[in-house]
Image: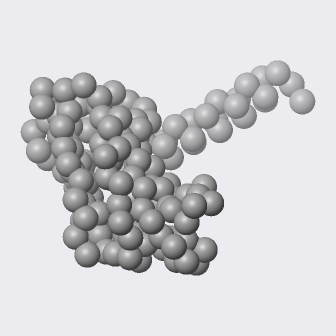
Amino acid sequence: MSTRKIVFGFVAVASALLMASTAFGAEVVVTSGASKAGKVSYAIDVVSSGDVASFNFSVQSPLISNAKSSMGGCLSDLPKGWSGGCNVVGDKMYVFATSDTLEPLAAGVHSVGIVHFNGGALVKEGSNVVIGDMFVGDVRGNAISSEAVTSDR
């Protein structure tokens, strides 16, 4: 195979990946994982294309309603100049954050924080996480196209 064909193939694949990765302006990623102590953890990440200035969403799971929580780390990794909060109501955890300085998140993956719930026997059944009530906004408060992604460790 000639060098020209290899380079052309690489450029074609790279272009396709770039176009696929920009289909959404933002992604909210919640990764759940169980520990040996009967707890489940939810790691929260936001993937930004460089214009995310606020977000809110809910995380619903049967583990949330049947558990005591450790919410202290929910937004512990927010960048400087951002504030927000987390609250549990029923079987949902609500998360919201905004840039106090109207400085959007830089393009890339941003760890937001992690929360822990005592899940008991339900941890073995799987977390069945559903992300809903989602809004991601720019500095003017306009909605940015976004996608919710859940994952198990």
Picture layout, residue 118 above or below residue 66:
above
Asked whether residue 101 appears in the rendered view, the answer is yes
Q: Is residue 11 left or right of residue 83?
A: right
User: Quick one: 37 or 124, which is closer to the camera?
Assistant: 37
Quadrant of image for the N terminus: top right
Query: Where residue 105 sits in the image (x, y, percent)?
Result: 29, 31
Q: How is the image coloured?
A: one colour
Displayed quadrant of residue 49: top left
Query: Where residue 125 sits in the image (x, y, percent)?
Result: 58, 78
Asked whether residue 29 appears in the rendered view, the answer is no
Q: Residue at x 45, y 65 (%)?
A: 118
Q: Residue at x 50, y 61 (%)?
A: 40
Query: Where residue 92 sits in the image (x, y, percent)?
Result: 29, 69
Picture layout, residue 29 above or below residue 52:
below
Q: Is residue 46 left or right of residue 86?
A: right
Question: Can you name the residue that lies furthest to the right here?
Answer: 1
Q: Residue at x 78, y 28 (%)?
A: 6
User: Quick one: 75 or 5, which is closer to the camera?
Assistant: 75
User: Quick one: 149 or 146, which is closer to the camera?
Assistant: 149
